[in-house]
Image (cartoon, rainbow, N blue to C red):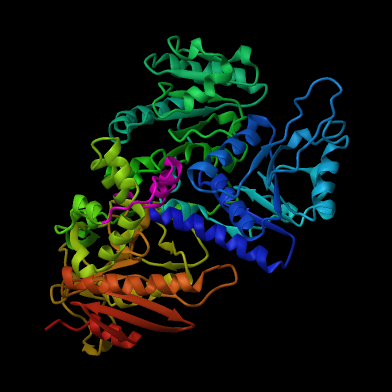
Amino acid sequence: MLTEIKELQNNAVKRLVELISLAEKTTYTFRAPTGSGKTYMMADFMNRMISEDSNTVFLVSSLSKSDLAKQNYDKFCDYKVQLGFANLTPYLINSEISGEERLHIPTGYNVYLLPRDLYKKDSRLMAGPMLSFLTELRFRNNTRIIWIKDECHIATTNLDALANDYFAYTINFSATPKLSRGQHPDVEITDQEAENCKLIKSVSWGDEDDNVEDAIKKFLEIKTDYRNLLDVNPCLIIQISNKTKAEEELETEIRPALDAHPELKWMLIVNDAKECETNDVFKAKKLPVSKWKDYAKNNLSGIDIIIFKLVISEGWDIPRACMLYQTRDSRSQQLDEQVIGRIRRNPRLMDFETLDMSAQKLATTAWVWGVSPKDKNKSFAVRLHDDKDDIQKEIKVKTTVIKNLTERETFNLNEYLENNKSNAPRRSIFSLYRDIERVDCSIKQLLYDSSNNYQDWWDIAEHVIEIEKENGKYCCDYSKSMVVGDTVSMPDQSYYIASDKYVNISNWVWKRKDGSEKFSFDSEAERDWADILKDMSSKYAYCIETGKKKYNSHQGEQTIFGEVIPDYVLEDEKEICIWGKNYVADSAIKFEYYLGALHSSYPDFIMKDQFGRMHIFEVKSVNQSGSMSIDNNIYLAKVAELKKCYKQASLLTGQCFYLPIQREDVWIITLFDGGEESTLTLDQFRKFIGTSPV
């Protein structure tokens, strides 16, 4: 798994724990998109809270449908063993007792999973056992009870009535918290953050006029690549109406399209098991319908298409699903984010960094035909200008990569193990597994590549943490570990998520597919820096016919970079500053650095000046808005490491690297040029760009 993913999840959980420690209120909302590891982060949060106060007990209420409570229980048990969440002792509350036997909930656990519908009017649990259980914990044992409302957008009226009397805190978890109920996120992982670190897929929206045959055609286009590049069989989900129109949609739209492709295996899953169908006579047909979902979600399942009624919003993980088609009759309703989330999980999340760029792109793209959620920020597709070949020829960026310890010529694994022998007793395989899960992917690869037998594996596994530390020391010495990587350019096309921080730009490499010149940015600092680059480049106009550039015509003399320019300069006298945003979603322009683990810096802007120099900008800010939650120590550590990285990268590549940091309205610009570091004002930066190198 990518380090960026771990850090994103870790920082979100850390922030939630910090907020509760402040005790400024009793209800908090944690929002993360479907597929971003919400259950894992929930377990991590509980484990941390219990480690700080062992007298803490969690009640986790989940939807009763799809056995969500049971799924969460199973995951918490796995996390306890596999991921070292040793503080968790889960218990699944159920009402499966016989006859007149009284329902009883034991108090010897600290994480209780409750299917929501068990606690409803006239239920055995509501008849007294739940109140007895909570009373014993809260008032007799003086236990702090924290209620986690999983999928909090669904009403929990009966449990809500208990909150003030029994729960110290209520924590709402959901991908779609209900703002009308006051569930405004206190901690949030945004879709854009999750997409940028490849935790979830980005969405490519199909044309509104496309029909199911168009969706199947697209599925057939990517099917072979999905199998060959990802070793995963892809899946198309078709969503039909819930009620009267469902049968008509099946007969007039879905079945004719399926009949035209008998080579594709499909399932129809509806509420009534008797109405479920499949053409997979060799496998699925031989299984009970209750097992179909489990069979279909496996990455190597042969089911190509799954047809659902509108019943798939929560509780079913199928990472291999990469397409969602919503029939026209149901498109009048807003597509629920929970439904889209079914196809946004990364099918190769755990080993994503081992894939090549084509495979990574495929693993992180989802295709949707339906109605875009109205309450979400809209994405805008961009592409290079029509002279894209010239642009990609002009912009050639040398990337850098970090070699790990295993690539160091002087490192010999057998010698290392021999020199670090221990007489301590062998640790359990579970303890070793937890260590292996903590280390960098390269160390895991070393373990498995170097193990010819069980004894080899065990010998190396005993030392993976020490090897990881040795690897960190080596990687942090960029003079030894950093090397020049691929030379890359801008992708043909990409996209960005709209925000209120925008600039109208016509003089850069990108154009929007809808023709608008309005481009938005992730932060105020990015927007302001884009305005600066735009202003500098607007001194020139691009001449497509000749590929040359000229100054804009103007009245009277004008001073540019301290140089007096006459009314008009011929188009072949000067070269232009070619520049653009480095959109992370499709970018190969990145530079590796090491901060506890391997990271990639995707700079914000790339520019080539009139003298042929490449300028690379990573924009930062110390102006924190009220909606931001940044750990200052983490932020400062990252900036310090980026400076080390860029200093060495500038020496190896001959490119100019910048860290422009905005403090209020003032820019402090750190320049790395030829391995040398200097600090510039904005005026000095402008002059540097306009001055020919010696």
Residue 545: image quadrant is bottom left
State how many labels appear: 0
Looking at the picture, how far across and down is residue 586, in whole percent?
33, 52
Q: Nearer the viewer, residue 70 or 498?
A: 70
Q: Nearer the viewer, residue 613 or 421?
A: 421
Depicted 565 relative to depicted 482: above or below: below
Q: Is residue 305 visible?
A: yes
**Left or right: residue 565 compared with residue 658:** left
x, y percent for residue 488? 21, 57
Position of 47 with respect to 265 (left or right) is right
Q: Position of residue 557 (x, y in %)?
A: 26, 89
- In the rendered image, residue 512 lying in the magenta stretch gets the answer no
Q: Which residue reaches farthest left?
A: 694
Is residue 47 placed above or below 358 in the rendered structure? below
Residues in magenta, as a range = 420-442
As drawn, 195 above or below 263: below
- State whether residue 357 appears in this view: no
Percent from the top left, x then y, of residue 237?
49, 29
Report the front residue among 687 and 275: 275
Check the picture and name the quadrant holding the C terminus: bottom left
Left or right: 166 as drawn, with respect to 446: right
**Residue 665 relative to residue 629: left or right:** left
The residue shown at (41%, 30%) is 299
